[in-house]
Amino acid sequence: MTDYAAVVLSVMASAHHHGEKGSLSTTDISARSGLGQPTVAKIMKQLSQAGLVNATRGKDGGYSLTRAPEAIAVATIIEAMEGPIALTACVETASDPCASRNSCFISGHWERVNTSIADALEAVTLADLTNPEYSFRPHPAVPDHLDTSRSVKAHVGNR
């Protein structure tokens, strides 16, 4: 559902960007996103509970973003839908800690990986997702000491 939440919030961010005032109904969001209205309603309830959208009742009611798209990180969207970002049970934010954590020699390294991914998700905002001119910068080349393709090619070439 997180991917659908990003789509729904992108629809709302696009409306915000184009200067649309007021709220969007679940019917409007459904029509603009291509998602079913029951799915949109379920997502909006969860996003409202997480504080990402405001719900307004009544004839002209609907949902609106609680803050600008530039202030909503992808990490925040994921956490709203799934809880804290935790790749494995051995990271601090895991909901069900690993029983082997104290004796596992790689658990400390998973924390570093988890933090790196969480930081990357914090760096991309809802505004970035909806901006057609935004381009993700490629990661730097793999350092030579980690490039396994050379040794694989050399090994295969020696057959």
Image: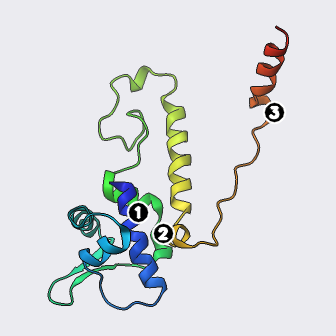
Q: Is residue 28 above or below residue 83?
A: below
Instruction: Kindly check if marks 2 and 1 are in contact, taking CB atoms under 8 A apart as contact.
Output: yes
- Marks 2 and 1 sit apart, C-alpha to C-alpha, by 8 Å
**Colouring scheme applied when the structure was drawn:** rainbow
**Label 1 is placed on what type of residue?**
Ala
- Marks 1 and 3 sit apart, C-alpha to C-alpha, by 36 Å
Other-residue count near label 1 (Cα within 10 Å), few / some / many at <14 / 14–19 / ≥20: some
Q: Earlier in the sequence, mark 2 or mark 1?
A: 1
In the picture, measured across the screen, residue 1 lies left or right of residue 38, that is: right
Q: Is residue 5 above or below residue 133?
A: above
**Label 2 is placed on what type of residue?**
Leu
Q: Secondary structure at mark 3?
A: helix
Question: Where's residue 49, x and y in %?
Answer: 23, 66
Q: Secondary structure at mark 2?
A: helix
Q: Is residue 1 above or below residue 103?
A: below
Residue at 29% x, 85% y is: 23
In the picture, measured across the screen, residue 50 lies left or right of residue 77, that is: left
The residue where tag 2 is placed is: 126
The residue where tag 3 is placed is: 144
In the picture, measured across the screen, residue 73 lies left or right of residue 95, that is: right
Residue at 51% x, 22% y is: 105
- Marks 2 and 3 sit apart, C-alpha to C-alpha, by 35 Å
Residue at 16% x, 90% y is: 59
Other-residue count near label 3 (Cα within 10 Å), few / some / many at <14 / 14–19 / ≥20: few
Quarter in which the N terminus is drawn: bottom left
Q: Residue furthest top?
A: 159
